[in-house]
Image: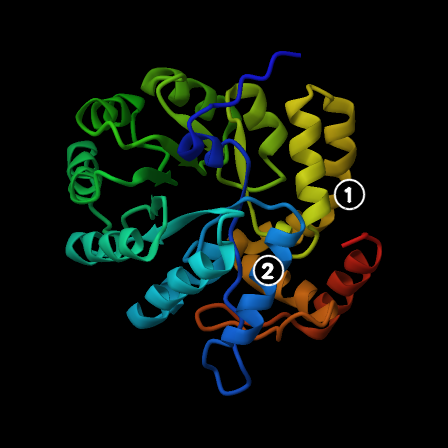
Amino acid sequence: MTDTRPTDPVRAALADVVAIPVTPFAEDGTVDEKAHRLLLRRLVGHGVTTLTPNGNTGEFYALTPDERRRAVEVTVEEAGSGATVVAGVGHELPAAVAAARHAAAAGARLVMVHQPVNPYVSDGGWVDYHRGIADAVPELGVVPYIRAPRLTGAALAELGRRCPNVVGVKYAVPDAAAFAAFARDAGLGRFVWVAGLAELYTPSYWAGGATGFTSGLVNVAPRLSLALRDALRAGAYREAMAVWERVRPFEELRAEEGSANNVSVVKEALAALGLCRRDVRPPARTLPAGRRAEVAALVRGWDA
C-alpha cells in the first residue's frame, strides 16, 4: 500500500494519534505536576508522538490561565525531541491570542483552537476569530476544533484561503456523513483531517478522509490506540474493528449522558492503574462506586 501520509512534520503530527493528556490533581486540588510529568513520559515512552495540553480531556475549561500556561511548558519539556506539541487555546480572542503566543514561545509547534463558546457565532465571525489567532502566530500550525454542525465547509475554505498556517481540522460533530461532506466542501486535500471524537468514531471518519484521531484512551492504554492507527493505515479494517470492539465499552462509558463522564472515566482508569488520583474539577464529578468497578474491570482486561 502506498503511504499517503504528509511529509511536512507539522502536518504529519496531526495524521496520527493525537493524545489529549489528562491534568492530574493532588489531594489539595492543585495540579500534581510530578504525576503530570510521569504520565507524559509514559505516553512518549510508548511511542505517542503528538501531545495536546489543554484539550478537553485535560479539563481546559476548569484550569486557571496560569495552570494552562504551565501545562504547555511542562508538556514541551517532557516531549523533548520525541513528540510534537499542539497547545489548546480558546476563550475570548485576546486571551486566545495571548495563549497562542505563549505556546509559540514555549516551543509548541501547533495550536488547537477550541470551539468558541459564545452562544452567537456566525460563519463570518467564526472565520474572524480563527483568523485573529492564526495571523498572530504565523510560525505555528493552527487547527480549528469544530463541534458545531451548522458551520459550513465554505467558511473553513475561506479561512484556509486567508490563513496558510491553518493546516488541519479537528472535526467533532458525531455524524460521519456530515464529516465526509464537510471535508469535501472545505477542501479534502487542503487540510489534515483529525477525527475529534476519539476511537469510537475513528474507523467511520477514516473512511471519509480523516488520517488522524484524538484520544483520551491513549492515556490509559496507548498500545490499543496505536494498534488502531496502524491497522487503519494499513487498510486492515477487520483488525481495526477488532481493536474498536475492545475499546468500545470504555468509550461508550465516556459518551454516556452527553459525555458528562468523559474525563472521569479516563481518570478512574488511571487511578485503577495507580498512575494518578481520580479527582476532577467541577462541573465534572468523579464516578459512583458501581461505575468505578466497571472501569477497573475493563482496564484489567487490557494490556495497558
Q: Position of residue 51 (x, y in %)?
A: 49, 50
Pointer 1 residue: 246
Q: Rounded to the nearest whole Å, what is the CA distance between mark 1 and mark 2?
A: 25 Å
Q: Position of residue 225 (x, y in %)?
A: 66, 42
- Which image quadrant: the C terminus? bottom right
Quarter where residue 10 is shown? top left
Q: Mark 1 or 2 closer to N-term? A: 2
The residue under the point 81% across, 52% down is 303
Tell me the tag on residue 41: 2
Quarter where residue 39 is shown? bottom right
Left or right of 250 on screen, residue 7:
left
Q: Position of residue 103 (x, y in %)?
A: 31, 54
- Which image quadrant: the N terminus? top right
What colouring does the structure picture have?
A: rainbow
Q: Please name the amino acid that badge 2 sits on.
A: Arg
Task: Work out whether 37 lies above or below 91.
Answer: below
- Alpha-carbon neighbours of circle 1 within 10 Å: few (<14), some, or many (≥20)? some
Q: Secondary structure at mark 2?
A: helix
In the orientation shown, which residue stands out farthest toward the front?
81
Q: Secondary structure at mark 1?
A: helix
In the orientation shown, which residue stands out farthest toward the right?
301
Query: In the image shown, does 82 or 38 lie closer to the viewer?
Result: 82
The residue under the point 36% across, 50% down is 108
The residue under the point 34% across, 48% down is 114
Q: Please name the amino acid that badge 1 sits on.
A: Arg
